């Protein structure tokens, strides 16, 4: 009998418990910047030095944190008999990989990758800072390999295909407000149970969705224990 497929969609709430600040604070700012100034093609065109330094700081901070109990539980579940695991994450850190997860799809790119402004298909590893004047082999400016507001999400079709094969769908640490990622829920098979783990439950939950009002670090291990039987 083929293994059942657990598909996990993770968002900022998972990384927040490791100490990475969530994308947008309640005042609409990200690290005291307007999101549009540091996470859009227009912001980069207007002030590339600001944007590059912003991501240099995010990259440096991400290196100082460690995977938490949610990351570790998801990685450990790959050893659960009868299950295989795919993780689709909106996060740009590598905490899932560092925890040991082997099948991770990043919807919005990764902090430790970069590409030229002219070629989004060729990606390079980035373990330090990027500055204005740092050029890719094609002679154009390097930029973070991050999907900014207003840009296409190249991995969304692959993500939808993965969700369509789910036997169980687990959504962790995301408000399901950011599209197109939020639309992935609709690709789950009709028979697929959907569980949302987030301490901030919506006032009007989605029909047929189970809500677990806990942080990722406690809710994920709990739900995985139930799945493992």
Image (cartoon, grey):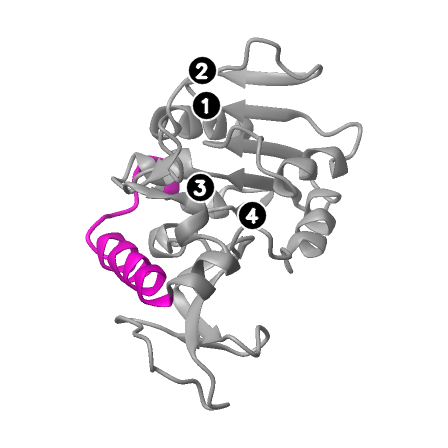
Residues at circles 3 and 4 in contact by the CB criterion of under 8 Å = no
- Specify the principal SS of the magenta part: helix
Q: In which quarter of the image is residue 126?
A: bottom left
Kindly identify which residue carries mark 4: 88
Find the residue positioned furthest to the front.
46
Q: Is mark 2 on a helix, strand or loop?
A: loop
Instruction: Rate crowding at label 1 as few (under 14), some (14 to 19) or many (20 or more) other CA atoms within 10 Å.
Output: many
Query: Where does the image place residue 180, in percent across and percent down from the top left?
Result: 66, 43
Disc nearest the viewer among 3 and 4: 4
Kindly identify which residue carries mark 3: 74
Kindly identify which residue carries mark 1: 198
Residues at circles 2 and 1 in contact by the CB criterion of under 8 Å = yes
Instruction: Rate crowding at label 4 as few (under 14), some (14 to 19) or many (20 or more) other CA atoms within 10 Å.
Output: many
Answer with left or right where residue 89 lies relative to residue 222. right
Q: What element carries label 1?
A: loop
Q: Give the alpha-carbon distance from disc 3 to disc 4, as whole Å.
A: 12 Å
């Amino acid at each position: 009998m083929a293994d059942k497929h657990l598909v996990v969609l993770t968002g900022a709430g998972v990384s927040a418990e490791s100490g990475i600040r969530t994308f947008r604070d309640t005042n609409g700012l990200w690290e005291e910047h307007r999101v549009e100034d540091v996470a859009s093609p227009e912001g980069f065109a207007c002030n590339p030095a600001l944007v590059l330094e912003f991501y240099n700081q995010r990259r440096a901070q991400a290196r100082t944190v460690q995977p938490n109990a949610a990351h570790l539980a998801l990685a450990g579940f790959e050893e659960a008999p009868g299950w295989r695991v795919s993780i689709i994450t909106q996060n740009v850190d590598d905490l899932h990989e560092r925890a040991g997860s082997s099948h991770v799809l990043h919807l919005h790119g990764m902090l430790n990758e970069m590409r030229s402004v002219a070629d989004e298909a060729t990606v390079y590893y980035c373990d330090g800072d990027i500055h204005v004047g740092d050029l890719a082999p094609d002679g154009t400016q390097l930029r973070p390999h991050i999907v900014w507001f207003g840009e296409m999400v190249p991995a969304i079709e692959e993500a939808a295909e993965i969700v369509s094969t789910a036997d169980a769908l687990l959504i962790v640490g995301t408000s399901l407000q950011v599209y197109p990622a939020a639309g992935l829920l609709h690709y789950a098979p009709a028979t697929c149970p959907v569980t949302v783990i987030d301490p901030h439950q919506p006032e009007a939950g989605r029909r047929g969705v189970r809500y677990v009002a806990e942080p990722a670090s406690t809710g994920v291990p709990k739900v995985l224990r139930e799945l493992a039987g």
